[in-house]
Image (tube, helix red, strand yellow):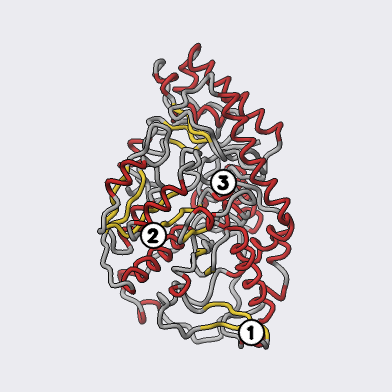
């Protein structure tokens, strides 16, 4: 049974001594805090701090965990996020003592197993993408984007060219234009055609000698495959540019198509989306980048190499863009990814993508009579509806999302991509069971019926959660950022 949980500061308000933990005796002399710290930084009293027993703390955080939604609890249909299950075998592999007890400063001779694992993962990703080489350094997808764009910039500089623009489709992830700007380019938006793909005529007009390249997501954020990708790549290359593929949606075609064969020069891979590593929530991540022969000389250092004596780290390369982070990578994330790849094998990876596409099309088929589909092109791994039919009753996508919580499902991605007003972006991923996907569809159909017959149920939702609908405008403009005992909260 879920209930509203107070802040940890609000527990034990009488501040009765619980003694949940006692610090060991200090091995240094006691010092008055005011002797070493400015007086205005020293607390006059510790009464504001919680004083709890061990069970109090355990119960508090356990109850908070029950308020969170997780993939382990049910379908998590966030579009463009690929919220797939993290298999426990991945965690078992990542917790092996030989992996957890090594240190990045150990001699190469003592970490041959770790280097071999990274080399094998690189080879697996190179094979899966059909590209020439791989770096595992980037710590996230956006970091991978930056790595790829810095390599593109250096390749152009090596050719003696100073191109200053990067084309970005209007359906792109927000990180694409941000990355282009961060890498020193001007991001220029290119409009989509009526089917949601890149407008080839617009690309032809805009692909000038100022353009360094095109950043393109395949399939795009509408879940639509760029069926003219070979023409796009040829046009970009003919005009002297390079093609960057955003691999956020790689899960849609692993084992069925090769980005290298599409003409990609760089592709980042979100391991948490395609290869089941945890979504870090700001924690450790990995966004490896695969590149074509054109960009291979500019890969970051160090690089894991295989030699006669085993495996090593290559540092010396004047062409490289240099290191992209401290040490080599978030190693245990890489362990999880390789465990997943080895567990499934080539046939399993292909089936993974097939099921992801099948589920997205099942959702599309079940819901298209109840929700508007702006772009009617064939769907790959996700489908993007909008709320225009429900808006006639004053119901919008945020109302649908909040009411869906009452049915036990996490909402889809809201209001993205930006070219679909009131978007409902649904990606089931292959992890779910058919029964779970069907149950989600039934819930969405029921919400569509409610919007027509009883719109107030959606406008006042959620009804079954510990916390009801909040004043979102006030929460954004007057956020409560600090708790104060017995007084007004600070904003």
Query: Which residue is tagged 3?
Result: 82
SS for dot 1: strand
302 or 74, which is in the foreground? Answer: 302
Q: Secondary structure at mark 3?
A: loop
Query: Viewer-proximal residue, 229 or 266?
Result: 229
Q: Residue at x 62, y 55 (%)?
A: 275
Please give the residue where the numbered disc 2 appears in the rendered image. Answer: 242
Q: CA distance from mark 2 to mark 3?
A: 27 Å
2 or 3: mark nearer the eye: 2
Q: Element at badge 2?
A: strand
- Sequence order check: which comes first, mark 1 or mark 2? 2
| Disc nearest the viewer among 1 and 3 | 1
In this picture, residue 365 sits left or right of residue 242: right
Place residue 446 in its image quadrant.
top right
Which is in the foreground here, disc 1 or disc 2?
2
Q: Is residue 15 above or below residue 34?
A: above
Residues at marks 1 and 2, CA–CA distance in whole angstroms: 31 Å
Q: Earlier in the sequence, mark 2 or mark 3?
A: 3
Percent x, y of residue 17: 57, 59
Circle 1 is placed at which residue position? Answer: 307
111 lies above or below 267: below
Residue 469 in picture, x, y percent from top left: 45, 31
Which comes sooner in the sequence, label 1 or label 3?
Answer: 3
Q: 25 or 236: which is nearer to us?
A: 236
- Residue shown at the point (27%, 48%) measured from the top left: 206
Q: Residues within 10 Å of mark 3 (few under 14, many from 20)?
A: many
Packing grade of label 1 (10 A; few <14, some 14-19, many >=20) is few
């Amino acid at each position: 049974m879920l209930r509203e949980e107070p802040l940890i500061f609000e527990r034990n308000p009488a501040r009765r001594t619980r003694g949940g933990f006692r610090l060991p005796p200090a091995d240094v002399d006691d010092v008055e805090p005011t002797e070493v710290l400015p007086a205005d930084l020293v607390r006059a009293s510790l009464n504001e701090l919680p004083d709890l027993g061990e069970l109090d703390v355990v119960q508090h955080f356990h109850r908070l965990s029950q308020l969170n939604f997780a993939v382990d609890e049910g379908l998590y249909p966030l579009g463009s996020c690929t919220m797939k299950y993290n298999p426990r075998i991945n965690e078992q592999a990542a917790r092996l003592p030989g992996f957890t007890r090594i240190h990045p400063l150990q001699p190469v001779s003592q970490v041959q197993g770790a280097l071999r694992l990274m080399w094998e993962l690189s080879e697996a990703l190179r094979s899966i993408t059909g590209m020439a080489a791989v770096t595992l350094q980037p710590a996230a997808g956006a970091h991978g984007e930056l790595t790829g764009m810095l390599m593109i910039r250096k390749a152009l500089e090596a050719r003696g060219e100073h191109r200053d623009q990067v084309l970005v489709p209007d359906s792109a992830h927000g990180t694409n234009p941000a990355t282009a700007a961060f890498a020193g380019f001007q991001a220029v938006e290119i409009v989509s055609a009526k089917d949601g793909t890149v407008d080839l005529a617009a690309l032809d007009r805009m692909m000038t000698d100022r353009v360094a390249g095109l950043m393109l997501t395949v399939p795009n954020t509408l879940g639509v495959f760029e069926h003219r990708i070979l023409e796009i790549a040829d046009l970009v290359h003919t005009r002297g540019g390079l093609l960057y593929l955003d691999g956020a949606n790689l899960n849609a075609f692993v084992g069925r198509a090769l980005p290298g064969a599409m003409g990609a020069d760089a592709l980042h891979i979100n391991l948490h989306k395609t290869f089941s590593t945890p979504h870090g929530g700001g924690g450790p991540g990995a966004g490896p980048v695969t590149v074509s022969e054109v960009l291979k000389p500019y890969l970051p250092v160090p690089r894991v190499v295989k030699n006669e004596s085993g495996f090593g780290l290559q540092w010396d390369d004047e062409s490289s863009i240099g290191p992209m982070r401290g040490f080599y990578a978030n190693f245990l994330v890489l362990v999880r990814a390789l465990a997943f790849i080895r567990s499934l094998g080539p046939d399993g990876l292909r089936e993974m993508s097939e099921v992801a596409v099948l589920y997205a099309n099942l959702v599309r088929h079940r819901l298209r009579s109840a929700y508007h589909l702006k772009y009617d092109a064939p769907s790959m791994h996700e489908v993007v509806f909008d709320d225009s039919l429900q808006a006639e009753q004053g119901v919008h996508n945020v109302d649908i999302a909040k009411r869906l919580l009452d049915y036990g499902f996490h909402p889809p991605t809201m209001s993205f991509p930006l070219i679909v007003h009131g978007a409902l972006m649904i990606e089931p991923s292959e992890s779910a069971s058919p029964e779970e996907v069907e149950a989600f569809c039934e819930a969405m159909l029921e919400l569509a019926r409610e919007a027509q017959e009883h719109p107030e149920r959606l406008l006042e939702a959620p009804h079954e959660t510990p916390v009801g609908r909040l004043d979102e405008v006030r929460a954004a403009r007057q956020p409560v950022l600090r708790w104060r005992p017995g007084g007004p909260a600070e904003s």
